[in-house]
Amino acid sequence: MPLIVTGTVGIDDIHTPFAKAERVLGGSCTYFAAAASFFTQVRLVAVVGEDFDKDYQAVFGKFPNVDADGLEVRKGGKTFRWGGRYLENWNDRETIFTELGVVADRPPTPPEKYRDSRFVFLANSHPAIQKQLLESFPQRIFSVADTMNLWIDVARPDLVALLREIDGLILNDEEARMLTGKRNVISAGRQIIEEMGPMFVVIKKGEHGCVLVHDQGIAMLPAFPVEQVVDPTGAGDSFAGGMMGHLAAAHSKDNNVSMSSIQQALAHGTVIASFTIESFSLDRLATLTKEEVARRYTKFAEMVRV
Ligand code: AMP
């Protein structure tokens, strides 16, 4: 089933309690596509500026399942830039700066050949842009979006309009609270599926895993325990990429994405995310093999067995 992702491709400055990395390849779409590519082919739609160096573009070549033909390089434009700092507990981070650059002008135009995409993931970006892009894929059967505090804050009406059109939403616990006003993640999740449109919500709780609130029930999963975290950036997008990549591969012939297949896909997303955080940017994913993924998945399945 063709899987497509739209979102940001950008350049990040990251500060962790132990190290910093400047001008590294990042962006919501970047991590998603790399992670999903371990399970299926993934099409990427994003826009960067003329300042997007060839070396950054070359990184996509390390992921043969990523089709980056939808990466538009806009003349005269500036690439999306983001700077973040992790606090001592590693779970909380603050944004130092966000420079939208070309992302603020107008969305990228998806290539015509992507119109038949069936699984759609709207990685973090302005919700109005997410909605506009969603409408470019009329044959979609399963669409999921990610969002973040910035958009809940500055673009809530656009986000509410987007939620009416999608099957699933992924966000973290703090964002779920901001969106609904509910402190309890289950209550927040229920409010989203009962009042806002999606059939399911995945609420991420950082190193404590995630909760799935679905109209068929509730499920939860711990994170894979990583002792040597280098940089948590991209964990959420890789998690989503692993999940959607696994779903698109598992449903190559049927359209029936059940709650149990989402649960299984979440476990694969969890495993891929645990690799992302072992280095900065895509460094770890670029050397990762499918065998390593399978081994860690087996280990994870043993850990969570009840
Ligand atoms: P994650 O750690 O999974 O939440 O994703 C981190 C990535 O999201 C970074 O590489 C950033 O470039 C990108 N990012 C940060 N803020 C935004 C935003 N407002 N919209 C879209 N992408 C963002």
Image (cartoon, helix red, strand yellow):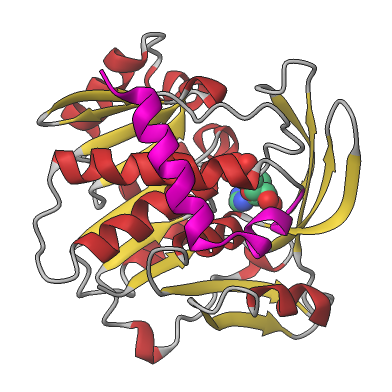
Instruction: State left or right for residue 49 relative to residue 237.
Output: right
Q: Quadrant of residue 46?
A: bottom right
**Picture quarter with the C terminus:** top left
Q: In this view, does 188 lie above or below 302?
A: above
Q: Is residue 283 magenta?
A: yes
Q: Which residue is drawn at 48% across and 76% down?
A: 65
Q: In which quarter of the image is residue 189?
A: top left
From the viewer's side, name the closer residue of 297 and 243: 297
Q: Which residue is drawn at 53% across and 53% down?
A: 292
**Picture quarter with the N terminus:** bottom left
Q: Which residue is drawn at 35% across and 55% down?
A: 244
Residue 149 image point, x, y percent: 56, 32
Q: Is residue 28 above or below residue 289?
A: above
Residue 95 image point, x, y percent: 75, 35
Q: Is residue 218 above or below residue 119?
A: above
Instruction: State left or right for residue 297 relative to residue 274.
Output: left
Q: Which residue is drawn at 39% across and 64% down?
A: 39
Q: Is residue 298 magenta?
A: yes
Residue 156 image point, x, y percent: 45, 37
Instruction: State left or right for residue 148 relative to residue 110.
Output: right
Q: Residue furthest bottom?
A: 113
From the viewer's side, name the closer residue of 256 and 8: 256
SS majority, magenta: helix
Residue 239 seen in this snapshot = no
From the viewer's side, name the closer residue of 295 and 38: 295
The residue segment tinted magenta is 280-306
Q: In this view, does 52 lie above or below 287?
A: below
Q: How many labels does the image show?
A: 0
Instruction: State left or right for residue 37 relative to residue 86.
Output: left
Residue 215 seen in this snapshot = yes
